[in-house]
Amino acid sequence: MSMLYAALALVLTLVPRAWGTDIGIDTARGESFVLPPDLLEILNAPGDDGAPIIGAEERGYFNALPDHAKRQTAEAVSRELITTPQHLGEILSLGLASEKLERLMQDNCVLCHSNPDVHEGATLFSTDPTGVGSPAHMNLAEVVEDLHSRHGLSCAGCHGGDPAGFMDHDFPEEWPEDADIRKKDRSWIPQFCGRCHSNAAFMRRFNPALPTDQLAKYGASQHGRFLLDKKDSRAAQCVSCHGVHGIQGPNSPRSKVYPKNIPETCGACHASAEIMAGLTLADGSPMPTDQLDKYRDSVHGRALLERGDIGAAVCNDCHGNHAAMPPGVTSVGQICRTCHAGNGTLFDGSKHKEVFDRNGWPECGMCHGNHAISKTDDTMVGIGENSLCTGCHAQYAKHNPNCNETAAYFHDSIVELNHALETFEVRAERLAEKGLDVDLIADELNRLADLVKQARSYVHSFDSSDFRQVEDPGREVVRKMERLAEDAEDEYRARRTGLLVSVFLIGSVALFLYLKLRRMERPS
């Protein structure tokens, strides 16, 4: 049977060449589809140079499509939704999976608005919006990959009309018909998106786990109050963060709300002096616009943007997303605890917790800052020039010398343990180069490295007795490594001595044998 299909495919390939007709063949099922003349005319139309306008790559893609996709393409041509080889070539250049192309060929909205014979400028979808003078959100490649489109929600879902018929632009009631009003006053957008996203019954059809309280959260947020109460359209709303067409889920690297993209998404407004002009913080000071630059240079920013660690804190981790608000002084520490739980637990049991609460200080932010959080180092603790402790102690604890003594004790202990760690790492390496077994030392080095990390964390207890829970085991590990290293060096000396003795004995025996042979060789 397979040979019969192969023979049929060969015949169907050769016959059209004689008839001047193309046939699409599905050899897997033995089916074929004869391309109608109007589609053939577009596929084979020559350019000014005589070569087909639709290139070989696009034509090869079309030829490889299953019959069903070819039939739907032919139907779109017959309905005059696709009228030129340039239009069809642009669609084919997208290289869509056949099921996506089939969905596109049934969407009169996109087919019509991607046809340059029908639309231009602001209403024309194109793979090169800039080149044809269309807005950036009219990118055809993004539209066909839109999250809504993948779930079967087409243009008509927002714009009204029937995607299988001809759109009548019967806009939903939340959408102002006047384009100037729509652009000037953006307060209609949250309610418009909430039409679906606040409807639990509707959203259950697509993703039962997706929350439907975004609109309520937005209304209570800083952005929501600014837009809905003050009617200031500078405030971020749904499309500011998610886009218009080409919306992607938050796990897609192409999404504007993918972790690595969030700083730029928020910075589009918050790093703009023009947008932030006239806005103030709660204390009346001007709204800053340097948060993005500070974040890029921070320990969180470098982890996210340079090392690609999407677990690093980003804007919405601290401020929220739909319910975005400035973190209050009392909530900053709780936000930091979502990642730095150990440090938070130690701080909660410290004397500093009481003092910070009494003075309304922002716990973690008091020492580490917010957007410009830098990588910590051991000089931050103690009484040195770069210490964070001395400034507060000089102002608030000048009559309590124990504060500076404790800070100095923390610093000196950590430095000593870390110096021991670095010293024994070098020492173990040299012992290994001498051929000695250093596995036990390596195990203790790993243990000491963990204890040094813990010691740096335990400074948040601000108590020397708590700190000694990791300091004392650390010093014991140092003493144990010293014994192991000395034993290894003794073993090396013993090996070297034994080797010298062995060489001497072997040499002595060789000399004795040599002399004995010489004596035997002498004539008697």
Image (spheres, grey):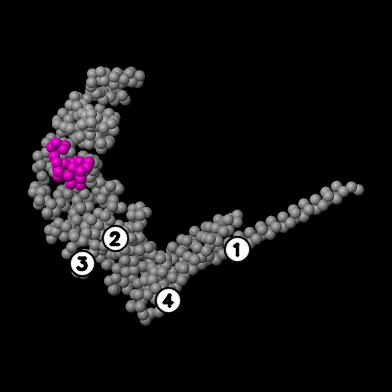
Residue 347 x, y percent position in the rendering: 36, 68
Task: Say whether marks 4 and 2 touch (CB < 8 Å).
Answer: no
Number of other residues with Cα within 10 Å of mark 3, as a class: few under 14, some 14 to 19, many 20 or more: few
Mark 3 sits on what residue? Answer: 286
Residue type marked 4: Glu
Mark 1 sits on what residue? Answer: 486
Q: Is residue 522 left or right of residue 352?
A: right
Number of other residues with Cα within 10 Å of mark 4, as a class: few under 14, some 14 to 19, many 20 or more: some
Residue type marked 2: Asp
Residue type marked 1: Glu
Q: For the residue labelled by badge 2, is the local secondary structure a helix, a strand or a loop? A: helix
N-terminal of the pair, mark 1 or mark 4, is 4
Q: Name the image quarter holding the N terminus.
A: top left
* Mark carried by residue 28: none
Number of other residues with Cα within 10 Å of mark 1, as a class: few under 14, some 14 to 19, many 20 or more: few
Indicate whether residue 120 is drawn in magenta. Answer: yes
Mark 2 sits on what residue? Answer: 293
Q: Is residue 145 left or right of residue 467?
A: left
Identify the residue at image location x=27%, y=61%: 291
N-terminal of the pair, mark 1 or mark 2, is 2
Residue 65 in view here: no
Residue type marked 3: Pro
- Using the rendered view, name the quadrant where residue 400 is placed: bottom left
**Distance between mark 2 and mark 3 Cα atoms:** 17 Å
Identify the residue at image location x=57%, y=59%: 430
Magenta segment boundaries in residue numbering? 115-138
**Distance between mark 3 and mark 1 Cα atoms:** 64 Å
Q: Considering only vertical position in the picture, is 175 above or below 40?
A: below
